[in-house]
Image (spheres, rainbow, N blue to C red):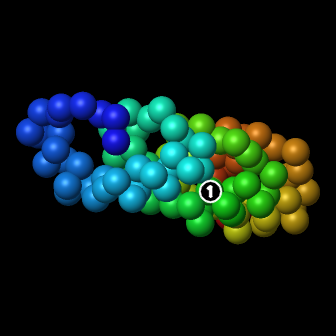
Amino acid sequence: MGFGRQPLDKLVAMRIHKITPEFIREMRSLGYENLSLDKLMALRIHGVTKEFLAEIKAEGFSPISADDAVQLRIFKVDGDYIRRMKARGFNNLTLEQLVQLRIHNIAK
């Protein structure tokens, strides 16, 4: 998969977090082509899936970085939350602004 030899602890972490060739291929097919193993693990740990990314894209945010995707999952900003914010008049917000709304418990 292009990662060369890895230390034993990294291989164990990959196994624990299910960083499989299929997952790596899936993330690469979604545009995350040059991610480190640590970034791939962060995506997996925080539940970034192709379905989640499709939700965010459907709301007009594309492409998004791996770091942004993780941050969205950490703060529970998903397609549903974005739609609710738009319905309340919060239009044309950035992902960071949506995260800030969520952090400050504005418009659950």
Above or below: residue 53 compared with residue 41: below
From the viewer's perspective, tell me whether residue 16 is left or right of residue 103. Answer: left
Against 49, is 95 above or below? above
Residue 54 shows up from this direction: yes
- Of residues 35 and 58, the one nearer the viewer is 35
Disc 1 element: helix
Q: Position of residue 10 (x, y in %)?
A: 18, 39
Residue at 70% x, 42% y is 63
User: What residue is shown at x 13% (from left), y 48% (from top)?
Assistant: 12
- Would residue 94 appear left or right of 19 to someone viewing this image? right
Q: In the visual, does 44 lie left or right of 88?
A: left
Quadrant housing residue 106:
bottom right
Q: Amino acid at mark 1?
A: Leu
Q: Position of residue 51 (x, y in %)?
A: 59, 66
Rendered position, 67 above or below 103: above
| Residue beneath disc 1 | 53
- Residue 103 visible in rendering: no
Residue located 44% across and 35% down the image: 35
Picture coordinates of residue 23, whole percent (x, y): 40, 56
Answer above or below: position of 41 versus 78. Answer: above
Q: Residue at x 45, y 52 (%)?
A: 25
Comparing 95 with 34, the one in front is 34
Quarter of the image where the N terminus is located: top left
Crowdedness of circle 1 by 10 Å Cα count: few (<14), some, many (20+)? Answer: some
Quadrant into which the C terminus falls: bottom right
